Image (tube, rainbow, N blue to C red):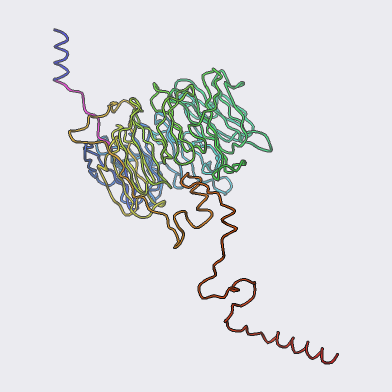
Amino acid sequence: KNIVLAMSALAASPLPLPPPCNVLLRTKTSLQSFKVTGGQTEASLDEAPPSTESPCALLKFSPAGDVAVVKETKGTGDVHLVASDPVTGSLALGSSTVLEGTATVQAADFSPKGTFLTTWQRPSKEAGAPPNLKVFEVATGKMVAAFNMKNPAVPGVSWPAVEWSSDEKVAMRIATNTLFIHRGDSGWEDGNVLERVSVEGIKQFSVSPGSSYRFTTFVPEKKGKPAKVAVYGFPNNLKTALTGKSFYQAEELTTQWSPNGAHVIVFTHTTVDTTGQSYYGSTSLHLLGADGSGEDFAIPLPKDGPVYDVKWNPDPLKPFFIVLSGMMPAQACLFNAKCEQLFLFGEAHRNIVSWAPHGRFVALCGFGNLAGDFDMWDINKKKKMGSNTTSAAVGYSWSPDSRQFMVSTTAPRMNVDNGVRLFKYNGAGPIGKLDLDILYEAVWRPASRGVYPDRPQSPLRKGETPPTIAEKPVVARYRPPGAGARGASFAERLRLEREGKAEAKKVDRTTALNAKYKPPTGASKYAGGVVGMAPVGAAPVTKSKNAIKREKQKKKKEEEE
C-alpha cells in the first residue's frame, strides 16, 4: 500500500523538466543568444534580445554555465562578468560586474567551480607597469592576486597559468624554473604559498581532476638532453615523482587526464620528422599511471602513421579513450586504461574525436582539410548510429544534453557561408540551420553534470532509416589524348601499380629488337636521323652576319697564304 501511495505521489508531482539548451553566437555586430527547442526531426532557434549591440571580442562561460565573461570592443572595453538567464541563455550586460583595468585582456579562464577567474593581457613595456596575469573573485569582481607571465600563445607556454584542483582547495601557478602551490580557497597574499617545487626548465604543467592533488611537469629537450615529463602528488610526493618518462623528438607536449585522475595520456609531437616518414613531423603516445602503480604503456597505434586525435570518455566511471591515427584513411580504436584494444571503428577519412558530455555517444569527424564527413557511434552498443556530411566545418560541439551536434562555419577561417547547422545525435539532419553574414564564434551554454539525464537512443519511427552519406560520383582522372588505358606518364603508371590497379608488364626483347621504325607520313627516310640536319625539302638555313663575316675573313686569309 505504501509503495502504491509513493508511486501515486510521484505521478501527481512529476520531476521538473531540465532547462532548454542555449546557443550563443558572437557576430560582427552583436552577441546573440538562441533557445533551441524541438530536436526529434526539426529544431528551432528562438532568438532572445541581443546581449550586446556592439561587437564582442571575448566570450567564455563558467563550467556550470551560470556566469560568462564578455568583453566588448566599444566603450571602455573592460571585461564584464555577466549572469546567464536560465531559460533564454541571454546575458544582461546592464547588470554586470565590470573588472577594472582589463581593457587589453586577450585570454580568460574559470576555476573548476567558477569561483575564480584568471585573465591575461599583453605586458606593458613601461617601467612600473602592473602585472599582466590577474586572478579575480567572481562573486565580488575583486582582484585577489596579480603576477607576470609571458605570451600564452607562444608554443610551449602553459595556459592557463593558474590551475585549481577539482575542489579548489589547491591552486598551482607556473613561473621560471618553479611551480608554486597556493591555497586556492583563501586569500592570495604571499602567505598562502604552501610549497615551491623547483623544476629546471619547466615550460608546462597540468593539474589532475578528481579528489587527489596530482600534477604533471614538462621540460622540453635542450642541448642534446631528452625531454622529460613527470607526475607528482601533493603533499606527499613532491621530492620523488610518482612516475615519469624521458623522450627524444618531443618539442611540444599535450597531457590528457582521465576523468578520475588515475591516468594521464602524454601526447608528444615535433614539427620535423628526422626519419623522413612524415611531412607533418613525428608523434608518440604514452599512458602513465598517476596512482602510484608505476604503469607506463606505449599506446599501440591502431594504424601506423601520424596521430590525429586522442580523447578520454568524459564519464569518470568509463575510463576508455579513442585514438585516431594512420595515413588516410585513418583508423580509430577504443582502448581501456590498460592500453588494451577493445574495438576498431574501421578506416575512414577522419581526424577528430568528439565525445558527447555523457560519454554515451561519440562523433568521428573529418573536418578541416577533409571532406566534412562524420560518423555517430553508440559506445555502449559498439554500433554506428548514422553518418552525414557538412561543408566548410570550422567549429563543432555537442549540446549539454548530448542530443544535438552543432557545426559552425566562422570567420576569419571562412569569410563566406558563415552560420551554424544542428544535427541529431545519430547524424540526421541538419534539423536546424542559421545563416549569418559574419560569425566569429558559436558556443553552447554549458551545464553542470546531472542537470540533463543520460538518455539512450530513441527508437526509429516507422519507415525511418539511419542517416547515411550519399555515394559521391567518381570523377575520372584526366588523360591526355592518345594516352591509352594505362596512362601516358611514367608517374601515372607507378601510381597505378602501387594501388594494385595495374600490373608490371615485362617487355619482350625479341619483339622490341625486330620492331621496324616507321617514319612520319610524307617525310624522308633520313628525317630526324641526324641531329642538326634539316629534313629534305626544308628551307635553307639563313646564316648570321657574324658567320658570313668570319667566312669572308677565313677565305681572304687562305688566298693570302
Give coordinates of residue 55: x percent, y percent. Answer: 36, 51
Q: Compared to 293, does 229 lie above or below? A: below
Give coordinates of residue 143: x percent, y percent. Answer: 45, 36
Please give left or right for residue 493 compared with residue 114 in the image. Answer: right
Rendered-image quadrant of the N terminus? top left
Q: Is residue 185 visible?
A: no
Rendered-image quadrant of the C terminus? bottom right
Question: Which residue corresponds to the image point at 68% horizontal and 87% vertical from the top-left?
Answer: 545
Specify whether residue 561 is painted magenta.
no
Give coordinates of residue 191: x percent, y percent. Answer: 54, 26
Q: Compared to 528, does 72 lie above or below? A: above
- Using the rendered view, name the quadrant where residue 553 is placed: bottom right
Q: Compared to 319, does 58 lie above or below? A: below
Question: Which residue corresponds to the image point at 40% horizontal and 50% vertical from the top-left?
Answer: 76
Image mark count: 0
Q: Compared to 482, does 195 lie above or below? A: above
Question: Which residue corresponds to the image point at 61% horizontal and 78% vertical from the top-left?
Answer: 534
478 vs 167, nearest the viewer: 478
Q: Is residue 490 visible?
A: yes
From the image, give the main secondary structure of the stretch colored magenta. Answer: loop
Magenta segment? 12-21
- Residue lying at the far right of the rendered structure: 561
10 vs 89, nearest the viewer: 10
- Residue lying at the far top of the rendered structure: 1
Give coordinates of residue 247: x percent, y percent. Answer: 61, 32
61 vs 2, nearest the viewer: 2
